[in-house]
Amino acid sequence: MQLPCDSSGPLPSPVRCVTVWWGQAEQCTGAAMAGVDTEELPKIPEEDMEAMNAAVGKGDLTEAAAKAKEALESIDKIPLNIAVTGESGSGKSSFVNAIRGLRDTDKGAAEMGVNERTMKTTPYPHPTYPNVIVRDLPGIGTPTFKPDTYLKQVQFSRYDFFTIISCTRFTSHDIGLAQELQRLGKKFYFVRSKVDQDLTNEKRNYDEGGKLKQSNAAMKRPLQYSESSILDAIRENCIKGLKAGQVTSPQVFLVSRWDFSKYDFPKLQGVLLDELPSLKRLALLRSLSNVSKEILEKKKQQLQTQIWLKSLASCAVAALPIPGLSTVCNIAMLMMSLKGFCRDLGLNEESLATLARQANKPIAELKAVIKSPLSEEITEDLVIKLLTKCAAGAVKFSTYVFEFVPVVGSVVSAAVSLPTTYFMLKNFLDAAADDAVRVLEVVMEGDVSNSEKQHENCSTP
């Protein structure tokens, strides 16, 4: 990043210097987001942006920082309500758990059962992001929840989208629900669950070499076992049935009973991110499990858009001088920012322990590839150390603005502090995102062999 002040030529005022840096910080964010559709990213209301820019332009950094702080706090309050419906035994509970990053045996997981346990709408908040709530709805078509009153009973308008789940074929009730949601303009997605069991059952018809044991003309099975062909056939069969029921352009996603990083679950996450409104998209993105590099990259991009807001807020809200540095900032706020990066990228003890348990790997194996500090390791001393390291990036800028210290005081302090905190936050995020990718690669290393073992052990539904 080019420093905002050039020592050659006439020197601008310190306020102008801060304003120029503010503009370049926004440009820096824009460069980081090159190639990304801006509609896919959360936006600050235009009036708030104008207020912040105006405040910086007139040197009122306190007002600008207050606006930045309000914008950041609002991000944690964006509500997202997800409806999950389907017949008993369809895999609803496992899906409710998976979309919240939990396994069926984890603490706080939705209860499993063969019989219908959901006799009323049951909310399950995300364990880390309570503003994201997955609601397990009663199955449609029971004596208590009849098709003609179902949507009214479950208060359909509160949900941002519906997920309709089945482990076999979608029923007439599922199709009727989709038709009504379609009429009302509500987003919905079909999830065909437990396809790993279908694959296991189908594999019994083939020998160890993958050749068909006995030809059955009625079934028209391929002579050679092909997982992709079986999955395609399941998906096409579901779509065919839904189209026959007058469902327009049905989207069907195949998911596993055991491993939600496989098959279409990552694709479903991507489609949801593409189709949700901007602010809702942000809430969902933060809550998603890191099951793919694409999700991790989207998280990094989203966090990059917040860096200049975090930098501004930390430099003017209850900011204090840092001993030994020409920097004034709110250390506690910076600590929260770094911890937030770690939380969103899964780099804390609780997230790593859950991931290690789910992947059946020692947590030490995951930690071995992490080079940046975990959330629990972030302290005031660490933040000061990181600021000291990054302060060198603003030496040229600092040298210039120090000439104005007797006159402008706090404005110059902010002019020095903004680029320092910006560099620190950006560097930390880059390193943490790289760590998250390395952790995912370790988890994925043994994924194929583990899945094969699970297929062998899931011969019963």
Image (cartoon, rainbow, N blue to C red):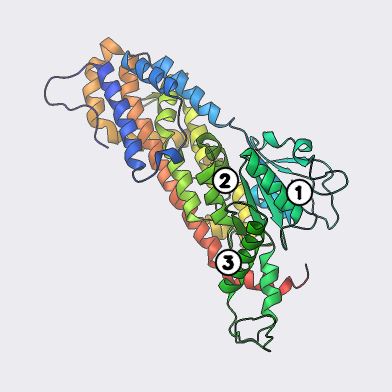
Q: Residue at x 79, y 48 (%)?
A: 140
Badge 1 element? loop
Q: Circle 3 sits on which residue?
A: 447
- Mark 2: which amino acid? Asn
Local crowd size for mark 2, using a 10 Å CA cut-off: few (<14), some (14–19), many (≥20):
some
**What is the x, y in percent for residue 76?**
57, 32
- In the image, which disc is placed on residue 348? 2
- Distance, label 2 to label 1, CA atoms, is 23 Å
Check whether the beta carbons of the residues at disc 2 and disc 1 lie within 8 A of each other.
no
**What is the x, y in percent for residue 401?**
24, 21
- Distance, label 1 to label 3, CA atoms, is 25 Å
Q: Is 45 drawn above or below residue 144 in the view shown?
A: above
- Distance, label 3 to label 2, CA atoms, is 22 Å
- Quadrant of residue 305 within the rendered picture: top left
- Mark 1: which amino acid? Ala
Q: Nearer the viewer, residue 41 or 156?
A: 156
Where does the C terminus fall, quadrant-wise?
A: bottom right
- Quadrant of residue 199 within the rendered picture: bottom right
Q: Residue at x 57, y 70 (%)?
A: 448
- Quadrant of residue 39 within the rendered picture: top left
Of label 1 and label 3, which has the lower sequence position? 1
Q: Circle 1 sits on which residue?
A: 110
Q: Is 188 drawn above or below residue 450 in the view shown?
A: above
**What is the x, y in percent for residue 235?**
61, 64
